Structure formats: C-alpha cells, structure tokens
Image: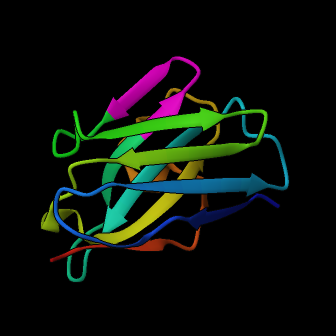
Amino acid sequence: QVQLVESGGGLVQPGGSLRLSCAASGRTLGSYVMGWFRQSPGKEREFVAAVSWSGSLYADSVKGRFTISRDNAKNTQYLQMNSLKPEDTAVYYCAAQRPSLASWRFPDLYDYWGQGTQVTVSS
C-alpha cells in the first residue's frame, strides 16, 4: 500500500518562503504524476501544481511563485513556495496519480493522498 507523508508546513509572514516535502513509501512512484492540492475552510480542494517525467503544470494563482520538483531516487516530491500571500493559507496535500492520460488538475483522478500539512501566511 502506498503511503504519502507531507512535512514542512508552518506559519510564515507574507512575502516569506516555505518548502513542503512529500515522502512516498510502499512502492516506487517514478512513473506516477505527483501533485499538490490545497484546501481552505469552506472551499473545495484546489489544484496547485503537478509534475511527471513529461513536465510540470501550475495553477495560475501560484505560477511564478511556486516550484514543484521531485527526486525519484528518494521517492520524494517538493513544493518550493516563495512570495507567499495570506490567500495561500490552506492545508496542503500531496497526491499521486497512476500513469494514464487523465487530467492532472482534478483531485478525483488521483489514487493516493497524504494526510495534509497546514500552511498559514500571516503577519
């Protein structure tokens, strides 16, 4: 069984940076699409970024500020978040999608999820 464990969340001031990590265990996910989603109270889970061997994709709201990457040797993916804004405050989830032609943007199309890590951007 695949397990995903996020870390790196916390409290940061506006304009600051955080790096989230997501460590996978149970199987090697080198061929999987790895994604990040976030959810704020009262809102639906929204796509943030995703990466596979073919490239990466970002939500417009984070493009130019966030960078997704992965280290297949460590079975780990990362989300570097710079120039953080209060509206980035949310629980951030990592997810993995089996190789397919499915869209990367929809949470229902992902197969495995982490438990989430809280990111709070506030002065």
Residue 36: x %, y % from top left: 44, 51
Residue 67: % across, % down: 38, 37
Q: Is residue 93 left or right of residue 90?
A: right
Number of marks: 0
Residue 40: where, in percent of width, then height?
26, 75
Q: Can residue 104 be seen?
A: no
Q: Is residue 44 above or below residue 123?
A: above
Place of residue 41 in the rendered image (x, y in percent of width and height, measured from the top left): 24, 82
Instruction: Report the magenta stretch's main SS.
Output: strand
Q: In the displayed orientation, state which residue is furthest to the bottom.
A: 41
Q: Which residues are magenta?
A: 50-57
Figure quadrant of residue 87: bottom left
Q: Where on the picture, by quarter, is residue 49?
A: top left
Q: Residue at x 26, y 58 (%)?
A: 16
Tell me what residue is drawn at x 47 percent, y 63 percent. 93
Q: Say whether residue 112 is visible.
A: yes
How are the residues colored?
A: rainbow
Where is the C terminus found, in terms of image quarters?
A: bottom left
Above or below: residue 53 compared with residue 14: above
